[in-house]
Image: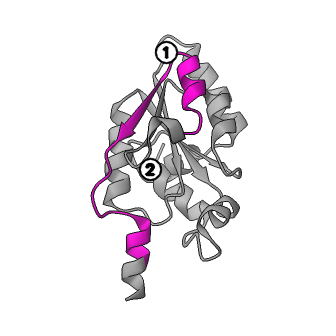
Amino acid sequence: MNFHDNIDAKIMTLSQLTERLDQLRNGTSKPRVVFTNGCFDLVHQGHVDYLSRARDLGDLLVVGLNSDDSVRRLKGASRPISNQVSRSRVLAAFAFVDYVVVFDEDTPLRLIEAIVPDILVKGGDYNRDNVVGADFVEQNGGRLELIPLVPGESTSNLVNKMKL
């Protein structure tokens, strides 16, 4: 498979993803599935650090990506800057991202409950009490990991710099 086709093959619907994870989990390898989510509007070094560290925690990384409508509801009418097709393809291009699934809800709880990850990852700006799905993951034998953020790196900071 060439690189271009591999990028598109990593982007799945939730039903495609759960079918693929079921196949992998029923095989001999029993991969540790890591899940994280976000808008990933303008990808920067903070995202690269965060996602690569998340992938290091397990055998495969699933990224839940907020849809354009979801981003608008969360961030306002001026966002996203990049549409969900572009954002999903950029994420899928990273070797450390195994699968990307777009979701339209305001939270990834439906994805988390369908995927049942072994490890749920969020950034260090969260705490255990405000991570959606943490209880579910822990009740199913998984764990929550909070990854420190790269200081000063955020999409909001990039947007503000572009306005100058």
Residue sitting nearer the eye, 9 or 157: 157
Residue sitting nearer the eye, 6 or 111: 111
Image quarter in which the C terminus is found:
bottom left
Give the class, few, some or many, for how many residues have Cα within 10 Å of label 2's Cα (few <14, many ≥20). few
- Answer with left or right where residue 63 lies relative to residue 58: right
- The stretch in magenta equals 131-159
Q: CA distance from mark 2 to mark 1?
A: 26 Å
Please give the residue where the numbered disc 1 appears in the rendered image. Answer: 30
- Answer with left or right where residue 137 lies relative to residue 127: right
Task: Name the image quarter holding residue 158.
Answer: bottom left
Give the class, few, some or many, for how many residues have Cα within 10 Å of label 1's Cα (few <14, many ≥20). few
Between marks 2 and 1 in the image, the one whose residue lies nearer the viewer: 1
Q: Residue sitting at 54 percent across and 27 percent down? A: 117
| SS at mark 2 in the image | helix
User: Can you give x and y, in whole percent of width and height, for residue 16 in the image?
Assistant: 68, 35
User: Can you give x and y, in whole percent of width and height, for residue 106 in the image?
Assistant: 67, 52
Relative to 25, residue 145 above or below: below
What kind of residue is marked 1? Lys
Q: Residue sitting at 33 percent across and 56 percent down? A: 46
Please give the residue where the numbered disc 2 appears in the rendered image. Answer: 3
Tell me which label, 2 or 1, sits earlier in the chain. 2
Q: Residue sitting at 45 percent across and 66 percent down? A: 42
User: Can you give x and y, in whole percent of width and height, for residue 80 in the image?
Assistant: 58, 69
Residue 70 on the magenta span: no
User: Can you give x and y, in whole percent of width and height, for residue 13 in the image?
Assistant: 69, 43
Q: Residue furthest left?
A: 151
